[in-house]
Amino acid sequence: MTFRNEVSIVLAGEAGQGLQSIETMVAAIAKKAGFHVFATKEYMSRVRGGSNSTELRIASHPVSAYVDRIDVLLPLTKAGLDHVRERIGPSTLVIGEAALLGEPKMVDVPFSSLASGIGASLYANTIAVGLLTSMLGLGPAEGESLIAAFFEKKGEGVAQKNIQAFRVGHAKGLEHASQLTLSLRPDPGVQDRIMVNGAEAISLGALAGGCNYVCAYPMSPGTSVLTTLAEYSKTFDLVVEQVEDEIGVANMALGAWYAGARALVTTSGGGFALMGEAVSLSGGIETPLVVHLAQRPGPATGLPTRTEQADLDLAIHAGHGDFLRIVLAPGDLAEGFSLGRKAFELADRWQSPVVLLSDQYFVDSYYTTPAFDPGQGPPEQELVLPSKDYQRYRLGSPDGLSPRGLPGKGQGLVSVDSDEHDESGHITEEKGLRKAMVEKRLAKLGAVQKDIIEPSLFGPKDGKTLIVSWGSTKAVLLEALEALGHQGHEGLSLLHYSWVFPLPADTRSRLSGYSRVIVVEGNATGQFANLLEANTGLRLGDRILKYDGYQFSVEELVDRIGGIHGR
């Protein structure tokens, strides 16, 4: 079995069996040895049992997308094997306990008896780490120090037992090395890269944007940002609070922004639905709000641990009334960081809600990526000290903005009210003022165009077929287009949107001039395609949609795009 410059390893088994531990250790060892790494997971909504899988791509070149292909499969249960069976190809090398799996063509490794020989069945996972490391052609020294560090908190005895288990697995891997011929070459540049997941990228971006207050009610997959920032609060000046419900979460965040903090809310679709009134309150009192919305399939509870891009309409239309909402959707880890930071800058400047849309696939996937540039520090807050004649909602600015005062400072009062108000923030029902305040808020819709991040075009400017995408589909589409190019498909371009609302004023011209436009997104109705149609008047009938709870794969998009482009 030969792989040119990468190998795709899949681990499959039950929740609670330690799949993530194996993945984490192998990934860390591979990166330390100079290889690029990509990892993602899919899992059922349960703490124990079920069937889950983790994919680990190890390569000589950067990789950042999910593939269906399995080169090496390590199933820990028969159910886990069956769970990924449709992905097994003729060249897949299956490694496991024959007595447990009953698979006719496989490498039989008696993990249970080997682990028992060390002292307990739980050492089987570390044996698997040693075996995979060995079959990748890495020496034992490259992994032993990381194994020791991984288990040091559990005591010297446990650490030594796991080092012993790693050595046993490594020796067993050497016995079967001939069945796996690799031509992987380490890349010295990997050492200058970091390895983080989407939740960490967004969290680090928020910190770079000056975030100093985080509140949330746990809801997967948004919880990963909450737990990540809770860990970072040990190092950064950051308050993290778990609130009793999502309604309280959003209102507490608004209170924090009003008082001068830079607050982040993280949630998922069901939680964000409860925040609709607070989003509208943000628009009405012109107080910033940043919400990270990690999408999962709905409606209702839906599939709590799966992925989808079906909350775009919800984010765009959240809250009643007419006011500016800004919606961003990072397409890769670098954008997770930069847009995580940008969200705070935009919310502060435009005194409006900003929604950062990710999804389960994005927040749970990680890979080696160039280190993020934090810039020169957090952007300065656009706050003023109120003078005696301060008016929170002063009219007359062409962009609809009036200075946001810091309450308790200066000489004036910072009065805000959720009812319609006059320039000083006092309740009014005078129709002239009502009209003026509506127009003041709506002026931001046009003015924000100067801050819009333009979509990225990949491929020829004069291509025949334009692929349009947004959010987490970026990396998998880029790899799919590269593969299509190798297959002889010419004239394919990709236009990727990370700023998804409001759309740029020149959107129609960007989509014109192509023989065919294909919109790719992970929902059932083509929400972004519908948005593009509504804003441009164009008919975008070619759509590649996915809504089974799983992410797109490179192979799937190669087949589906190739089928449409070749017509």
Image (cartoon, rainbow, N blue to C red):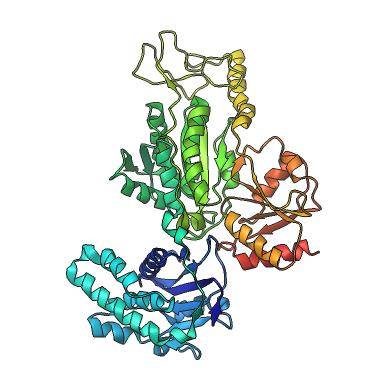
Asked if residue 77 lies left or right of residue 160, the reply is: right
> Where the C terminus falls, by quadrant?
bottom right
Along the line of sight, which residue is nearer the eye, 463 or 256?
Answer: 463
Give the x, y percent position of residue 394.
52, 14
Residue 209 figure quarter: top left
Identity of the residue drawn at 59% across and 60% down: 476
Along the line of sight, which residue is nearer the eye, 183 or 294?
Answer: 183
Along the line of sight, which residue is nearer the eye, 464 or 284?
Answer: 464
Q: Is residue 223 above or below residue 85?
A: above
Residue 257 figure quarter: top left
* Farthest-out residue, top: 389
* Farthest-out residue, front: 188
Look at the image and tell me whether residue 274 can be seen: no
Identity of the residue drawn at 67% across and 60% down: 481
Asked if residue 332 lies left or right of residue 142, the reply is: right
Give the x, y percent position of residue 488.
75, 66
> Where the N terminus falls, by quadrant?
bottom right
Q: Is residue 466 above or below residue 162?
A: above
How many numbered badges does the structure rendering display?
0
Give the x, y percent position of residue 495.
67, 49
Look at the image and tell me whether residue 353 can be seen: yes
Q: Is residue 433 above or below residue 304?
A: above
Give the x, y percent position of residue 497.
62, 46
Q: Is residue 40 above or below residue 238?
A: below
